[in-house]
Image (spheres, rainbow, N blue to C red):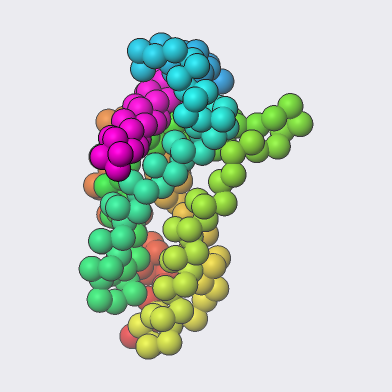
């Protein structure tokens, strides 16, 4: 009985993953507004009812797309951040991790951007909770004071600096969306320089 249950769980997990992948591809190609469950189902080669069996509705499916995208971004960023032995190296690792995610998963990125920008109800309220995307900002904001305490970084507002960095990274994402031929490695190197200069303690 246990092996049957494990097999069933594996099949369900594989089906959910297939649906999420089809949703990502559909949103990246047609945009959020045109990514109906019916269109996603057609891309997956299944009926709309199969999606409804695995997800309560489009909002739940979109949350899973965001979750999967965030997990992939974390997988790109964390090793680079943790490899840094100084605050400046960890800041650089954060930027490099974001660049690596954009390069490796452009379709996921396109879907994430579409969902966050367009998942709204008739009153204009977001229908997909995006609070988990503050995680990277909070992590940088928490790490910067350590560099200040040991005298590596000058005094500044860590949250403001982290939010500014996030805004600059989002600008890179928007630039890449408009120009897929953008040299992301060069852009990332140029992007990190002003933040290193802005946070480093003067000699």
Q: Would residue 156 be visible to someone looking at this image?
A: yes
User: Residue drawn at (39%, 37%), measured in percent from left and top?
Assistant: 109
- Left or right: where does residue 116 sit relative to residue 101? right
Dominant SS type (magenta): helix
In the rendered image, which quarter is residue 17 located in? top left
x and y, in percent, of residue 83 in the image? 23, 68
In the rendered image, which quarter is residue 118 located in? top right
Residue lying farthest to the front in this orientation: 1
Q: Nearer the viewer, residue 24 or 11?
A: 11
Residue lying farthest to the right in this orientation: 123
User: Residue drawn at (47%, 22%), measured in percent from left and top?
Assistant: 51
Q: Is residue 21 magenta?
A: yes
- Left or right: where does residue 181 sit relative to residue 39? left
Q: Split into 4 quadrants, where in the image is the N terminus?
A: top left
Q: Split into 4 quadrants, where in the image is the C terminus?
A: bottom left
x and y, in percent, of residue 150 in the image? 37, 88
Q: Nearer the viewer, residue 32 or 193?
A: 32
Q: Is residue 53 magenta?
A: no
Seen in the picture, residue 65 relative to 58 is either above or below; the reply is below
Which segment is the magenta one?
A: 1-29
């Amino acid at each position: 009985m246990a092996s049957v249950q494990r097999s069933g769980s594996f099949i369900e997990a594989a089906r959910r993953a297939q649906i999420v992948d089809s949703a990502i591809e559909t949103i990246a190609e047609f945009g959020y507004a045109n990514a109906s469950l019916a269109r996603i189902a057609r891309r997956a080669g299944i009926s709309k009812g199969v999606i409804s069996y695995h997800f309560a509705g489009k909002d739940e499916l979109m949350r899973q797309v965001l979750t999967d995208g965030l997990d992939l971004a974390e997988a790109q960023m964390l090793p680079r951040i943790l490899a840094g032995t100084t605050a400046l190296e960890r800041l650089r690792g954060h930027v490099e991790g974001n660049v690596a995610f954009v390069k490796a998963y452009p379709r996921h990125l396109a879907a994430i951007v579409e969902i966050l920008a367009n998942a709204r109800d008739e009153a204009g309220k977001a229908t997909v909770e995006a609070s988990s995307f503050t995680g990277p900002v909070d992590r940088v904001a928490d790490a910067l004071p350590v560099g200040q305490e040991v005298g590596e970084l000058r005094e500044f507002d860590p949250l403001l600096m982290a939010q500014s960095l996030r805004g600059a990274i989002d600008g890179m994402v928007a630039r890449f969306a408009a120009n897929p031929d953008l040299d992301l490695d060069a852009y990332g190197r140029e992007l990190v320089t002003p933040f290193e200069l802005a946070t480093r303690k003067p000699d």
